[in-house]
Amino acid sequence: MDEHVAELVAQGRRSLELAPNRFLELLERGEVSADRLRALAGELYHLVSSDRSSFAFLAARFPEPLFLAMAGAEEEALGLLPAFAAAVGLGEKELRAHEPRPLAQAYPSFIVRTAVFGPRSAIPLALLVNVEESGGFYARMADALQARYGFSDEAVAHFRYFAETPDEVLEQAAGVVSTGLAAGDDPVEALRAARMVHAYEAVFWATMAE
C-alpha cells in the first residue's frame, strides 16, 4: 500500500463515528428471538444479492480484477446463507420471499448508487477503512450463534466467510484506490463514501436490533 493510500485509509478510520452494535450485544447475551434471526436471514439475502450485482456492475465500468473478485465473494457468501436460514427455520423459498425493511436495505442501496455513479476508488477505499470493524462484527456474530444458540459450523459459515478478508483482496483494493486517484478521482468523495458505508452498515444493525 503506497503512502498516499495508507494516509487516506488512516484518515478515513479517524473520521468514523464508532458506536456500539446493539444487535450484536443482544446476540452475545442470547436475547435475540428466533423471529429476529429469521428476519436477519431475509435481510442478508436481499443485501448480499444486491451487493453481488453492484460489484458486477463495477467490474463492467472498471476492468479491475478486484471487482470481479468481490462479486464472486458475494456469490459464495450467498451460497452459504441457506444453511443459516435453515437453522432458524427458513427454506430457500421463504428466504427469497422475505419482505425487506427499508432502513435495513439503505446500506446496499448506497452501494448501488456508488457503483453506478461513484469513482473507481470509492468502494475499495470503503473496504479498506471498514474491514477491521466489519469483520470483527461477523466473527463475534458467528461465535455468539454457536455459543448461545448452539448453531453448527455449517450454519455460521456465512458469517465466518465475511469475518476475514484475504490479504490479496486488500492489496488489490489498495492498488485500485491508487489507480483511481492517479486517474483523477477526488479523494474527498472517496473518503465520504467510506464514511457513508460505515454509517449505513450501522443503520442496518440498529434496524435489526429494533
Image: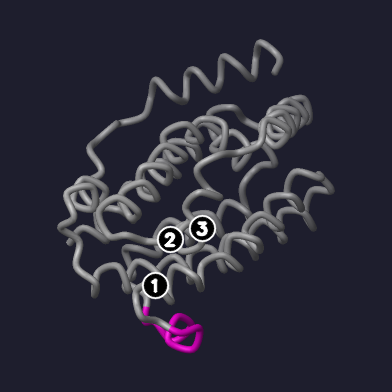
Q: Determine the secondary structure under disc 2.
A: loop
Q: Determine the secondary structure under disc 1.
A: helix
Q: What kind of colouring is applied to the model shown?
A: one colour
State the extent of the magenta-drawn residues as a range.
Answer: 91-99
Question: In the image shown, does 164 or 10 lie closer to the viewer?
Answer: 164
Q: Examine the residues drawn in magenta and state their main secondary structure.
A: helix
Question: In the image shown, does 185 or 51 lie closer to the viewer?
Answer: 51
Mark before the other along the chain sequence, 2 or 1: 1
* Amino acid at dot 1: Ala
Task: Say how many tags the image has.
Answer: 3
**Which numbered mark, 2 or 1, is in the foreground of this view?**
2
Q: Are marks 2 and 1 in contact (CB under 8 Å)?
A: yes
- Residue 177 location in percent, x, y? 69, 30
Q: Is residue 92 magenta?
A: yes
Is residue 30 positioned above or below 176 on the image? below
Compared across the picture, whether 147 is left or right of 156 comes to left
Residue to which mark 2 is pinned: 152
Q: Are marks 3 and 1 in contact (CB under 8 Å)?
A: no
Q: Is residue 73 magenta?
A: no
- Residue 114 location in percent, x, y? 57, 51
Residues under labels 2 and 1: Cα distance?
9 Å
* Label 1 environment density (alpha carbons within 10 Å; few <14, some 14–19, many ≥20): many
Is residue 129 positioned above or below 96 on the image? above
Residue to which mark 1 is pinned: 87
Q: Determine the secondary structure under disc 3.
A: helix
Mark before the other along the chain sequence, 3 or 2: 2
Q: Are marks 3 and 2 in contact (CB under 8 Å)?
A: no
* Amino acid at dot 2: Ser
Is residue 102 positioned above or below 10 on the image? below
